[in-house]
Image (spheres, grey):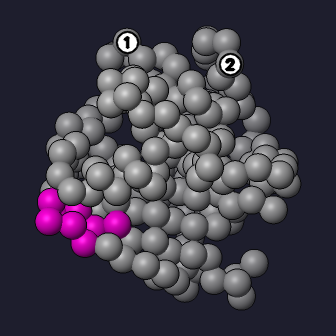
Amino acid sequence: MRELVYYVALSLDGRIAGPDDDFSAFPIEGDHIELIARDYRDTLPGVWLERAGLTADRSRFDTVLMGWSTYAAGLSHGIDDPYPHLRQYVFSRRPRELPDGITQIVDDAVPTVRRLKAEDDSGIWLCGGGLLATALLPEIDRLILKINPVVLGDGPALFRGGDYDPRTFALEDSTRFRSGVVINEYVRRSTER
């Protein structure tokens, strides 16, 4: 069974974007970008891969899950197919018009994720947002959090609402960068499942 990984950037105050889904406060330059381009290349948008002359090999992730707000953040920049190298699923509470090749899920997200996890392939990347992550919390196997040295004060949170058990995840690895970014990796404790 493959893993569902919530791999996301966030601020020191737990925001995955600023107000109005603004991501501009997160640094896109620095030594942490080298690691992302090397080890998390599958998570780079298609336009970034093209500009950098890189190719995603789908070895880490072959599928990406997004809530509507996460997907829609690219629309104002003319990006309606953010990860053409991955199987893309957009979760929304109401039907939306999406380009061919992007699957929309209006139903409960959990059965879809369980079906995807049962497939044989590389990982499933949950890239946002907080409402979808909250709905899928029982299915998340790993958290990879790129903690940025900024405070946003407002914006969507890593998780939104719900009851949480603080012992659900255990820190597995932590990497500090000169840029001030810290990448923490947590795994679900086996006793929780």
Instruction: Tell me which secondary structure the magenta stretch mostly adopts.
Output: loop
Above or below residue 96? Residue 166 is below
Q: Is residue 168 left or right of residue 52?
A: right
Q: Residue at x 63, y 63 (%)?
A: 140
The secondary structure type at the circle numbered 1 is loop
* Front-lying residue, 189 or 38: 38
Q: Earlier in the sequence, mark 2 or mark 1?
A: 1
Please give the residue where the numbered disc 1 appears in the rendered image. 78
**Rendering quarter of residue 145:** bottom left
Q: Which residue corresponds to the image point at 28% horizontal and 50% vertical from the top-left?
A: 33
Part of the protein shown in magenta: 176-183
Asked if the residues shown at circle 2 and circle 1 are in contact, with their CB atoms under 8 angstroms apart, the answer is no
Identify the element where label 2 is drawn: loop
CA neighbours of label 1 inside 10 A, class few (<14), some (14 to 19), many (20+):
few
| Of the pair 175 and 99, the residue shown nearer to us | 175
> Left of 118 or right of it: where is 38?
left
- The residue that label 2 is drawn on is 101
Task: Quadrant for residue 88, please give it.
Answer: top right
Residue 191 in the image, given as x and y percentages of width and height: 71, 88
Image disc number at residue 32:
none
- Is residue 54 positioned above or below 38 on the image? above
Residue 150 lies, in percent from the top left, at 16, 57
Please identify the quadrant where the C terminus is shown. Answer: bottom right
Q: Position of residue 152 (x, y in %)?
A: 19, 51
Circle 2 crowding by C-alpha within 10 Å: few under 14, some 14–19, many from 20: few
Specify whether residue 52 is painted magenta.
Answer: no
The type of residue carrying mark 1 is Gly
Q: Position of residue 28 (x, y in %)?
A: 22, 43
Task: Name the residue located 72 percent from the left edge and 44 percent from the top edge.
Answer: 109
Task: Name above or below for residue 91 compared with residue 97.
Answer: below
